[in-house]
Image (cartoon, helix red, strand yellow):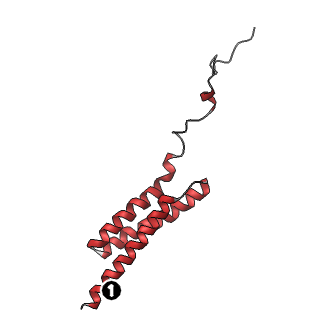
């Protein structure tokens, strides 16, 4: 008399052998997304105050660099991280231009 193991169901579906595509890897893009959001905030904040824009831009570039490393290790695209880095650099340059113009008119 042969009995099936109690931990295995009598009938198996092909879905039982594969992990859910939704359950894996979603949390690994947080740094890239944070970089993009911080880059947008930095760009908007640098229009109001260069110093605040620089702070947000520094975080955007830092998170973007770390997000690109994670994406490359996982073999994925790094578009959000790159966009965050670019927006951060643009925010820094915009702040520098504002400070240079302010000093030129003094």
Using the rendered view, name the quadrant where residue 101 is placed: bottom left
Q: How many marks?
A: 1
Which residue occupies the extreme left position in the image? 106
Q: Position of residue 21 (x, y in %)?
A: 55, 39
Residue 66 located left or right of residue 104 = right
In terms of secondary structure, where does tag 1 sit? helix
Q: In the image, what residue occupies the spot 42% across and 60% down?
A: 36
Q: Position of residue 49 (x, y in %)?
A: 28, 74
Q: Residues within 10 Å of mark 1 (few under 14, many from 20)?
A: few
Q: Which residue is mark 1?
A: 100
Q: In the image, what residue occupies the spot 58% across and 54% down?
A: 76
Quadrant where the N terminus lies? top right
Using the rendered view, name the quadrant where residue 75 is placed: bottom right
Residue 55 located left or right of residue 82 = left
Residue 84 lies, with reference to residue 106, above or below; the image says above
Q: In the image, what residue occupies the spot 39% across and 75% down?
A: 92
Along the line of sight, the residue nearer the viewer: 66 or 21: 21
Q: Position of residue 100 (x, y in %)?
A: 32, 86
Quadrant where the C terminus lies? bottom left
Which residue occupies the extreme top position in the image? 1
Residue 74 located left or right of residue 96 = right
Residue 50 lies, with reference to residue 63, above or below; the image says below
Q: In the image, what residue occupies the spot 50% across and 46% down?
A: 26
Which residue occupies the extreme right position in the image? 1
Residue 100 located left or right of residue 69 = left
């Amino acid at each position: 008399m042969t009995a099936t193991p109690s931990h295995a169901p009598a009938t198996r579906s092909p879905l039982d052998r594969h992990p859910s595509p939704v359950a894996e890897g979603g949390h690994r893009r947080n740094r890239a997304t944070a970089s993009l959001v911080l880059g947008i905030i930095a760009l908007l904040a640098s229009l109001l105050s260069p110093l605040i824009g620089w702070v947000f831009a520094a975080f955007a570039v830092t998170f973007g660099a770390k997000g690109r490393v994670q994406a490359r290790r996982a073999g994925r695209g790094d578009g959000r991280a790159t966009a965050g880095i670019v927006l951060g650099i643009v925010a820094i340059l915009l702040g520098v231009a504002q400070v240079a113009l302010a000093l030129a008119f003094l």
